């Protein structure tokens, strides 16, 4: 997925997940409240969105969490 359009399509299809360490479960990218995105300073490739850390509020425990993206194909 080398372009932003593919990334957005994958998110819209519900195939992107984040991990809540407090609930110990995966939550869908579309179901969370997105708070921030932390860039990975060590990644210099063409797909930075896959290597960022997302800060989000989990809809299950309402806790603020951080997770990298996971794709379920």
Image (spheres, rainbow, N blue to C red):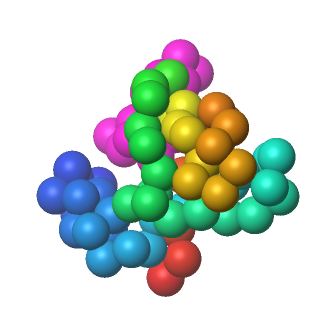
- Front-lying residue, 5 or 27: 27
Q: x and y percent of residue 69 in the render? A: 54, 52
Residue 62, percent from left and from top: 63, 43
Residue at (49% x, 82% y) in the render = 73
Does the segment drawn in magenta span residue 72?
no
Q: From the image, which quarter does the N terminus lie in?
A: bottom left
Q: Nearer the viewer, residue 24 or 50?
A: 24
Q: What residue appears at the point 42 percent right and 38 percent down from the top-left corner?
A: 34
The magenta region covers: 39-51
- Does the magenta stretch mainly form a helix, a strand or a loop? loop
Question: In the depicted view, which residue is nearer to us: 27 or 10?
Answer: 27
Position of 22 with respect to 12 (left or right) is right
Is residue 34 toward the left or the right of residue 20 in the image?
left
Residue 43 in sight here: no
| Corner quadrant of residue 57 | top right
Residue at 39%, 74% (x, y): give it.
14
């Amino acid at each position: 997925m080398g372009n932003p359009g593919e990334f957005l399509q994958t998110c819209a299809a519900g195939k992107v997940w984040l991990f809540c360490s407090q609930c110990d479960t995966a939550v869908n990218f579309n179901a969370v409240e997105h708070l921030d995105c932390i860039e990975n300073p060590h990644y210099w490739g063409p797909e930075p969105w896959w290597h960022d850390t997302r800060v989000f509020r989990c809809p299950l425990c309402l806790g603020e969490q951080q997770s990298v993206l996971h794709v379920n194909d």
